[in-house]
Amino acid sequence: MEHIPSVDDLQRARPDLGQVEFVASGGFKAVFKATLRGRVEAVKIAYVPPDAEEDTSREEIVARVKREIDTLRMCRTNRLVSLGSIDLQMITIGGRDYLLYSEEFLTGETLRVRIRNGHRPDFEELVLLTRCLIEALDAIAQIGHIHRDVKPGNIVATGDPERPFVLLDLGIAYKIHGTELTARGGPPGTLLYIAPELFRPDYKSALDIRSDVYSAGVTIFEYATGAHPLARSGESEYTTVYRIVNQPPTKLATLRPDLPEVFCRLVDRCVKKFPALRYPNPRALLQELEEIE
Amino acid sequence: MKVYAQHGHQPSDKITSGLQEKVVSGVIFSTRYADPQRMQERIAEAQAARRDADVLVDPEFYATRQMGTPNCQLGYLEDWDYFKAQRRRDLVRSEVVERVLQNTFMEVSKLDVSAHIAPNIYISQSFDSMEAGISLNFIAGAKAAFQDKKKPVYATLAVDRRTLLNTTDFKAFLNDLTVLDNPPDGYYVVVGGGLINERTDLAHSEVVDANVISGWMLLNFILSQNGFRVINGYADILTPFLGVAGGHAGATGWWSNLRVFSMGRYIKPEKAGGALPITRYLSKLLLNRVKVDELLAYSRVLPAVLNRLPHDKDYAGGMPTRTVEALQTWEALQSLNDDIIEKDVESSLKNLSEQVARVKAAYAQLQGRGISEGVETITEYLDQLSGAVDGFRRLAEL
């Protein structure tokens, strides 16, 4: 995100926040950890450019953040991060406008960190991850939305047996049949996890929950093996896109022959190129997962 | 994979015998060959022959396309109230589609079928067409219009072979088909081979094309993977291929126009009459029908040409009856299904590939013994079958 305010500036603007720490920054939002009335929360802020700035419009940023919050509010599941005590508000820090709100602060580490550390999950953990992730997607699908940015960096392993894996960041969540909120033209999401159909110029007509099922499959595959089913390290983005669109993915059983074949087939089906070959919706996947469990 | 009888002209006791002998598990009756009253009688006969028979009626609404065509032959279709041609520009309105669906249901719901087949139009050219859009509306509305909670509803998907050749449009259609809000319980799929001579046999038909068969297999695979049952009309020898891909049933009948679908069946041939087709024997080993004298000659050289099934004996004494010919076909198909189709697609595909390889080896052996009649056609036919298996693997990402 551009123009990330300093911890001091944020605290000056919101004196009710205590023990403020910078956590991370993404494409259009930054996250701070802070205490508010004795409770630790994740304070999220998004820079809102003046109208005159080209590229990303003010209205678009505001609408995206509002949509993320609305989606979280409507989804009734603890598989998704929940909203905190600060409602959405516009604040000015150092003469710049920001949107600010809070979510619960999740302790734990993202799957991305675990993959980097060489974590090798067993079958039980993989089934748990699949269940949590797909239940989160189901909740999103039930309200007619899709997440569009499922990836290891957006899933937190909390260590809490009640909700061991939690899906974050609905910043580019999309309401099917709703207004388009990513105006930049290319497919939304993080390149390595974008479903092949979204690279087509007419991708908006192909958008449905099966794109999320694909990203979930890639995420589970990568968590299980430490490797992406298609991309190779050090290659160009062009090559990666070519692989995603044209080449068959590695089968999970080839890298994890210790896992039950039925589970490998389930993950392999999620990463099929042709959406109709994937599970039609999260519930169909959960049903099959139940049979495996 | 079940085998069903495809009802047609002159059924006599073929269907009831097939059901009694359990060489078919069900029947797809045609409204072209029976008026409403006769249809009820036919259904009762079928149910008496086999209590657990699957009994369906194809309303053949897609044949309304031929109404008004000079020389159209629609049989009893025009005796059914729902069978009324609609202008295409009217069918683009969803309320007109709903009305056709409801009218059909009103009439066919009086029949004691085990499952309903909802009507649809025929997609003649492309899945990226107005026809395809209308067809999708028929499918999307089928479940709501056929309000019979006790019986499953199969939506008709009737397409010309050419529609399966453009994989981009075909796949886009499948993507839409698999995310409908209130989908039917299954699909009744009919793939047409164009305006061909009705008496052309399968090996010569336009449907026997690697890309058409692999597309038809993909249709079965995707629909079954998405939880739908697929009944394939006019599937004949392709039945085991479609079963490998996940199909629930394949139907065939006793005349060649019941083995390969063509919209040409609703138009009178220029030359009426002519000799009846020669009685044949469906050899599992050859995946093809052979004449009775050929069967004798081939089996002397290669005894495995005979299926070693009960109806073989009916061919030992010369020319069997038409009923026996139909029973023998169904018996052979059911046996092929049992040999080839397993629970998982990979094992089934392996069996199917081995079966096609055996057919090639058998013909090579026959040729080596000086039997070479029609070898070019057969070679082409077998190349298309093996190409279909490879093509399906690619399309289904297996």
Image: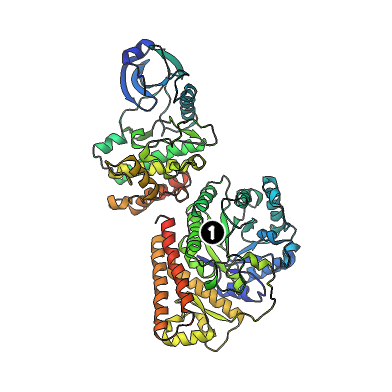
x, y (%) of residue B318? Answer: 55, 88
Extreme residue in the left direction: A117
Viewer-side residue, B333 vs B63: B63
Number of labelled discs?
1
**Quadrant location of residue B396?**
bottom left
Q: Is residue B62 visible?
A: yes
In the rendered view, tell whether residue A190 sits above or below residue B386.
above
User: How many residues crowd around disc 1 within 10 Å: few (fewer than 14), some, or many (20 or more)?
Assistant: many
Q: Identify residue type, mark 1.
A: Val
Q: Is residue A128 visible?
A: no
Extreme residue in the bottom direction: B317
x, y (%) of residue A63? Answer: 49, 25
Tell me: B392 left or right of B131: left
Helix, strand or loop at disc 1? strand
- Identify the residue under disc 1: B230
Viewer-side residue, A239 vs B19: A239
Tell me: A179 left or right of B57: left
The structure residue drawn at horizontal position 32% and vertical position 28%, both measured from the top left corner, is A107
x, y (%) of residue B260? Answer: 58, 68
Tell me: B374 left or right of A268: right
In the rendered view of the protein, which quadrant contains the N terminus of chain A?
Answer: top left
x, y (%) of residue B198? Answer: 62, 72
In the rendered view, tell whether residue A190 sits above or below residue B71.
above
Q: How is the structure coloured here?
A: rainbow
Tell me: B224 left or right of B106: left
Chain letter behind tag 1: B
